[in-house]
Amino acid sequence: MLRLFKIAVRNLSRYKRRTFLTSSLIAIGVMFVLVFIAASGSFKYIMIGQITDSMLGHLQVHKRGYVASIDSLPLTLNLSAKAEKTLEKTMEDIPEIEAFSPRIKFGGMFSNFIETTNIRVNGVYPEKEIATVPLFLSRIKQGEKSIKEGEILIPELLANGMKTKVGDTVVVIATNQDGSVNGKQFIIGGIIESVTGPGGRDGYMHIKDAMEVLRMEKMEISEVAIRLKNFGKLHAVNDRLDEMLSKELKEQGKPIFDVRTWEKLSPFYNVARMIDVMTFFIKLMLIAIVLVSIMNVMIMAVFERIREIGTISAIGTLPKKILSLFLIEGFSLGVFGAVVGNILALGVIFLINLVKITFNFGRQSGLVLSPSLNSGDILWISAIVIIVSVAAALQPAFKASRMEPVEALRHV
Amino acid sequence: MSLVYAEDLTKVYSLGEIKVEALKSVSFEIEPASFISFIGPSGSGKTTLLNLIGCLDKPTSGKLEVSDVNTSDLTRKEAAAFRGKNLGFIFQDFNLIPVLTVYENVEYPLLIVQNVPAEERKNRIISLLETVGMIDQKDKYPDQISGGQKQRVAVARALVTNPKLVLADEPTANLDSKTAFMVIDIMQQMKDEFGVTFIFSTHDPKIVREVETVYTLQDGILVGQTAGKGGRHA
């Protein structure tokens, strides 16, 4: 086998220019695909990071049925204090959970005493919220970067529309579970911007204030946002938590809790999916490049070496060894192209990181693109290139191995 | 026992609707350790006959046994294995593998075809390269040596597997007289030393003069069998 490799490599070096051009084409293809994967991956993870670290958290737990009616923020589907205790206890047994933040969410009216509009309010524990969504404070554009009792953070467009500013007194009015209406005065503590750009009606206040507005005597939670120590374990933790919580049943025998990853809660998951689909099509293009290049070279190689094939066949080389010889040539071209492409890609990625390319996402500007490759990407792309190279060489190699020696020797 | 036994050997080629009879009921026997030549004008069927004996092609009808094996029944794979084990080939155009050195060309059948152990392989190659006078050129590539040298390497490659039979198609056609005689001498020496049978297809009178038996083919028919100078000396 080693000798077949030696012969194959020498055959490739016999046509230096052709081998160089083909392997260069493969190498450049590999480089572009890897750089695209690294850059789009970086963009995707920055985007996911912005969504999860500013607002959603990695996982969320609701009472079953809440998410289906999330637009109306139904207070009747809040988790009871007992259920919340059960949830907290369960989370204590999962070491991968870094932090969690219980939230009371409700819809209400926001008045500056002249005009009134609607608002979605999130009542949170400030420390827990910041620990769970660490970019939260960076969204506060005006005012102190904190949530104090008696204060409310209001969304930017709402502040503009209602001509209110930090320090103004406003009233938040809401209907509680019993149907009675209650209001409370707040000082505008800060103006907060949405993660994804203009829009959004989410304001924030301390959870105790939310309880007061809703006249809650006992704590009831709309959702619990969870942050993991390692985002890569998202699905594993989701499954584990879901399994553990599925044992908690309502009186009717149905599960109380509903555990969801950020993917099932944010429309931006579809953008992330689109990036994955684009990457898939880029990989398909690479496969096409490799397939056409190698097949072209190997067809030429077989055509140019018909007499040689006749000779080695005449002196007793078995058809499978002739097949192997040409497959090894395709394999070697693929390996060479993949190795050079990987080196080039690592070089380009190093340069991109050195230059520090920045971009804007939503309201966030100056995000630094920091592409990186993991060994899985490198191995996966290399494996694709090598397998496709061998597959592309298969037809010409098979043709060579099936050649009649007497006709091959007659070839001029 | 004959090394090659042919009875009513016929080969018909189909060129579209036209059928060409390259060999017509040819029968002969060749004993081991013979030095034989098939002669005849172009198109007489010499190369076709050599191809059949060399298991490179199959007869349309008739019986052909080489080393007691009915070669007509061999599959493609069996034929390749049979050639690798029993036959050696010398071609008019030398047909050395251009990416291998002289040494590696001779080594090729032992390594790729017969899988002979390294030590034995080396001994056989060195010995044969010394015999054909190419030991000094062993590290050169085919494009770095002359035509005569290439044919000597081809002779060494054909003999390195210790074949019972070597088939040589116009082996001296591309060589000058001096080199041709040198190559013929080497082949005679191999035949005498190792009992290898050589069958030539040739126009070259230099070979015809040296062989033991000359078979003459004309229009696919075996029209004569005469003893050569080699035969007289034998």
Image (spheres, coloured by chain):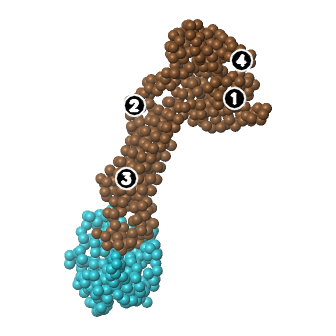
Residue B42 is situated, as x and y percent measured from the top left of the image, at: 26, 81
Ranked by sequence position, the earlier of labels 2 and 1 is 1
Q: Is disc 3 surrounded by few (<14), some (14 to 19) or many (20+) residues within 10 Å? A: many
Ranked by sequence position, the earlier of labels 2 and 3 is 3
Q: CA distance from mark 1 to mark 4?
A: 21 Å
- Which picture quadrant has residue A326? bottom left
Tell me which chain the residue with mark 1 is part of. A
Chain corresponding to brown in the figure: A
Disc 4 is placed on an element classified as loop
Tell me which chain the residue with mark 4 is part of. A
Ranked by sequence position, the earlier of labels 1 and 3 is 1
Disc 1 is placed on an element classified as strand
Ranked by sequence position, the earlier of labels 3 and 4 is 4
Q: Colour of chain B?
A: cyan
- Which picture quadrant has residue A185? top right
Residue A63 bears which disc, if any?
1
- Residue type marked 4: Gly
- The image shows residue A51, relative to residue A395, as above or below, that is above
Residue that numbered label 4 is attached to: A179
Residue that numbered label 3 is attached to: A293
Residue B176 bears which disc, if any?
none
- Residue type marked 2: Leu
Q: Is residue B194 visible?
A: no
